[in-house]
Image (cartoon, rainbow, N blue to C red):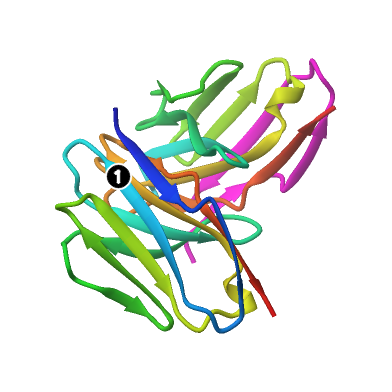
Amino acid sequence: EDKVVQSPLSLVVHEGDTVTLNCSYEVTNFRSLLWYKQEKKAPTFLFMLTSSGIEKKSGRLSSILDKKELFSILNITATQTGDSAVYLCAAPAGSQFYFGTGTSLTVIP
Amino acid sequence: DVKVTQSSRYLVKRTGEKVFLECVQDMDHENMFWYRQDPGLGLRLIYFSYDVKMKEKGDIPEGYSVSREKKERFSLILESASTNQTSMYLCASSLSGTPMYGYTFGSGTRLTVV
């Protein structure tokens, strides 16, 4: 059965902390893994990862994929209150995506 | 700017009512999806469609039906709303085939059934 599992389910940190969010997957014919950020409404795209060991970076956010161990991590450095959101990872299987349950991040001033 | 539009942001309905949630995309995408999102359960696929008049059941289709009469519009129907259908509903679309490059999501409809 295809599945995507995220941990932790929730996280509370102080501004300036660094956080690591985890996503493990078991997906038939793996092609890519995506990270989304969801604030109050629609998830917005962050990264797409297809190759192991190649870090994708956007400002304070970075992500990497390990296709051997079947996981990905999303790092956020120097967190800000605006980083508070649910972070979702997803992998396509067939004609749909499988989503993890998300990690709810709260950044306290 | 391409987008997926859901007709209502917030909706309150009574138990037993028939509810229509509308989703329209302007990207000429073949695939369209309806998810519901609940705390601790993540996004769960209700139905999806890969072409006009085609539909496939997702993981939790019970209590729902869908309609896709035109390529750009995908409607989710709650035949007789129940309180356990209170949730956030997200519509998404993608190009045909494997959605490797991800979905485009609508803003969501938060439905409360009382």
- Asked if one can make out residue A42 in the rendered structure from this viewpoint, the answer is yes
User: Total number of numbered labels?
Assistant: 1
Q: Position of residue B110 (x, y in %)?
A: 71, 42
State the residue at coordinates (76%, 45%).
Answer: B10
Q: Which residue is at the front of the view, B77 or B45?
A: B45
Which quadrant of the structure image shows residue A55? bottom left
State the residue at coordinates (19%, 71%).
Answer: A54
State the residue at coordinates (62%, 47%).
Answer: B108
Q: Amino acid at mark 1?
A: Tyr
Q: Is disc 1 placed on a helix, strand or loop?
A: strand
Position of residue B98 relative to residue A66, above or below, is above
Horizontal side, residue A35 vs residue A27: left or right:
right
Position of residue A26 relative to residue A65, above or below, is above
Q: Quadrant of the C terminus of chain A?
A: bottom right
Q: Which residue is at the front of the view, A9 or B94?
A: A9
- Asked if one can make out residue B95 in the rendered structure from this viewpoint, the answer is no
- Asked whether A49 falls inside the magenta stretch, the response is no
Horizontal side, residue A26 vs residue B20: left or right:
left
- Asked whether B16 falls inside the magenta stretch, the response is yes
State the residue at coordinates (29%, 44%).
Answer: A25
Q: Position of residue A69 (x, y in %)?
A: 19, 51
User: Circle 1 marks a residue in which chain?
Assistant: A
- Residue designated by label 1: A25
Q: Position of residue A37 (x, y in %)?
A: 50, 62
Position of residue B82 relative to residue B103, above or below, is above
Q: Which residue is at the front of the view, A19 or A95?
A: A19
Which quadrant of the structure image shows residue B111? top right
Magenta residues (range) = B1-27
Disc 1 residue crowd, few under 14, some 14–19, many 20+, Cα 10 Å = many
